[in-house]
Image: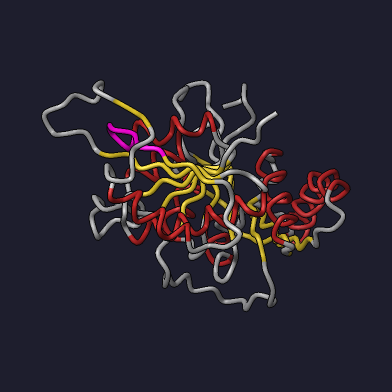
Amino acid sequence: MSTLPVIAAVDGSDDSLRALDWALDAARRRRAPLRVVHVRQYAAWAGPDVLTAGPPESDQDSVLDQVRARVAEIADRPATEYLVLEGAPPALLPELGSTAQLLVLGSRGRGGFASLLLGSNGMAAARDAECPVVVVPRPGREVGSQTPAEPGPRVVVGLQADSPDETTLAFGFTEAALRGARLQVVTAYQWPLQTWAMPGELVPVMIDQEAVEREARTLAEGFLAPHRKRHTDVRLDLQVAPGDAAGHLVGASEDAELVVVGRHRRRLLAPARMMGSVTQAVLLHAASPVAVVPPEPGTA
């Protein structure tokens, strides 16, 4: 049975070359082949249904020529293939996920507006691809972390204690094991608690915060237990904190190797694929690469 490749989407931009380097490392760790894909935007007068695909010759695509030269300098490079697609990147990139174990791309490409923290290609792929999508940000993002992290490699994963995503947790544990990294699990609980008293009026609930935190920690520990048994070599740190989950994850991203978040489950009244607000905020602001993990097939 063949191993699915790690796919790196490139367009010649510095962002995509950083994504290529990340994908090369990921493919080596997984002992997987690497597939480098350049999606060339179709001409303005051509419709999006006019799409062609095929492996180019070296003189047909300058972007892949640049990538070949970069990859050739790596001594322990994985088996690598190159592919050109022609069409609309936001439409074609998510489709690559059906034939990959991981799709990696930069936060912005050549066509992105300088003011955007995440381009349309990254947003579309993270929302729609069938495999996990890793978005590699530009260096130098400041996240304002108040707590210095313990030295050493670290993978961060978000856990929603009242609605855990087993696929996201499994990806986080596996990634930490592949990297020999500590796994930092971040779970947030709502505080202060409030309830409705009269129409338009919110009042605090008289519940002890320590009790709420203990309950959140107990729930989280229970969900993590089977993963810990499968990955006894992974050191786990559980962080339980009040307030905004996105803020805690973004803060934890400083100096992390990866932040892992779930995409979103489909809701009854919102059947289209979507990303939750926490996932979107982490993609926009995290200092480290972010992996967005889709739900288990059949629950998306």
Q: Quadrant of the N terminus?
A: top right
Q: Nearer the viewer, residue 291 or 43?
A: 43
Task: Give the residue displayed 54% in from the left and 40% down from the top.
Answer: 263
Q: Is residue 281 left or right of residue 40?
A: right
Residue 242 appears in the rendering: yes
Q: Nearer the viewer, residue 37 or 259?
A: 37
Q: Quadrant of residue 217?
A: bottom right
Q: Quadrant of the C terminus?
A: top right
Q: Nearer the viewer, residue 32 or 292?
A: 32
Residue 196 appears in the rendering: no
Task: Give the residue displayed 41% in from the left and 53% down from the top.
Answer: 68
Task: Give the residue displayed 43% in from the left and 42% down from the top.
Answer: 82
Q: Furthest residue to the left?
A: 45
Task: Give the residue displayed 72% in from the left and 49% down from the top.
Answer: 174
Position in image of residue 171 (x %, y %):
67, 45
Q: Is residue 228 left or right of residue 59?
A: right
Position in image of residue 83 (x %, y %):
40, 38
The tally of labels here is: 0
Position in image of residue 235 (x %, y %):
80, 62
Find the magenta span and give its range. 83-90
Is 51 colored magenta in this rendering?
A: no
Is 85 colored magenta in this rendering?
A: yes
Q: Is residue 146 left or right of residue 117?
A: right
Q: Is residue 82 above or below residue 179?
A: above
Q: Is residue 209 above or below residue 224?
A: below
Q: State the colouring used for the structure image.
A: secondary structure
Q: Nearer the viewer, residue 199 or 96?
A: 96
Position in image of residue 149 (x %, y %):
65, 75
Q: Is residue 142 above or below residue 87?
A: below
